[in-house]
Image: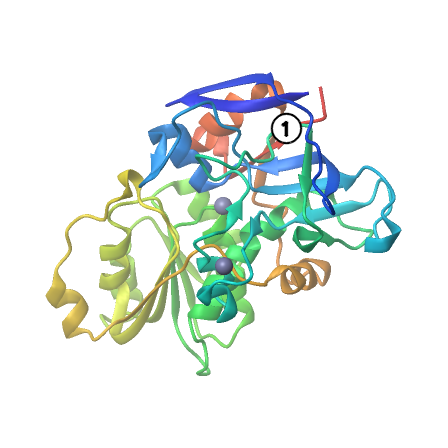
Amino acid sequence: MRAAYIHGIRDIRVGDKPTPQPAANEVLLSVSAVGVCGSDLHYYKEGAIGSARISQPFVPGHEFAAHVIEDRPELGLKAGQLVAVDPAKPCGHCEWCERGHVNLCPNVEFMGAPPTTHGAMTELISAAPSQIFPVPDNFTDIQAVMLEPLGVAIHAMDLAKMKRVLETVAIIGSGPIGLCLLQLAKLMCKDKVYAIDPVGYRASLAKKLGADEVADSHTAIADWTGGRGVDLVLEATNSPMGFQIAAESARIGGRVVLVGIPDGDQYVPLSASLLRRKGLDIKMSRRMGHVYERAIKLVAGGRVDVDTMVTHRFALDKADDAFSYPAEFHDGAVKTIILPNQA
Ligand SMILES: [Zn+2]
Ligand SMILES: [Zn+2]
């Protein structure tokens, strides 16, 4: 079968991959659609995120929808059924898993995370039953894919501790995660939700999906709030400036949740006094915990629009375009999707 491999920086090629042999209780799945994540773009543009480095041809892809190949009545799965797949298989018995922080499990097997576990940009994949989430009948493959990035946003929003009525929120970055965060912030008790993105078409999309105000620079937040800053900043950029921008946008005593992964695995040096004098409450968000059931409910109920941000679909042969379009902000690309079983 075929798979898209990252061979090196900006070098993606389709090649052969052995058909997976599902272990013990695993389920064989036909991959119908895979999203290109901001993290995948780091592997594409830089070949690594910190110590996670691509040293040999590697199949990316961790946000995907698939169809069950064979009836598995003992699991309640039918042949042809559409499912979403949680890319993470935490060990379940380490200290962090025991404490419920499965997103921090150091023994996790995460599909599409180099160097070891190949991802879903291929025709067939096998997954453990615990990773498989059947979706409602009226879901599209694209909606099933988008449960993963929406799940990342749900996890970050859980960390944001939104408890007080009428809070102001700023979303820094209007990529897929930022656009999910924006919609979740709108659903929760809020006053104004602001969105910042220097890429014009992305800021426009934030406006369309409900942002009260949008701008290309966070300096607008000071104007909108009379210099106060916002109660909560959710940062979802790939910018080394993201942390500083978030800190500058928060009010005194405000909260900052950092979700984005900065280019080069570095934040620019930022002023300790900026963080300290505001007494900021800063949280780092990593992947997600148990979020699929809520993500399914939000999409099924029409409360989060995950379709509008999906701008492009490509066959596996065009995998390079699926990466380069969002990497270069080409042709209005926001979320690009690869369809591995379509010609
Ligand atoms: Zn991702
Ligand atoms: Zn664990």
The answer to whether residue 208 is left or right of residue 297 is left
> Residue 215 location, x and y as percent?
35, 52
Amino acid type for the residue under numbered disc 1:
Thr
Residue 208 appears in the figure: yes
The residue carrying pointer 1 sits among few (fewer than 14), some (14 to 19) or many (20 or more) residues within 10 Å by Cα, namely many
> Residue 225 location, x and y as percent?
29, 70
- Quadrant (top left/top right/bottom left/bottom right) for the N terminus: top right
User: Dot 1 corresponds to which residue?
Assistant: 122
Mark 1 element type: loop
**Residue ID at (74%, 38%):** 28
Residue 87 to residue 122: above or below:
below
**As rendered, which of 144 and 182 lies closer to the eye?**
144
The answer to whether residue 64 is left or right of residue 212 is right
Residue 5 to residue 196: above or below:
above
**Residue ID at (41%, 29%):** 44
> Residue 200 location, x and y as percent?
40, 41
**As rendered, which of 66 and 197 lies closer to the eye?**
66
> Residue 199 location, x and y as percent?
38, 41
Task: Look at the image and name its color scheme.
Answer: rainbow
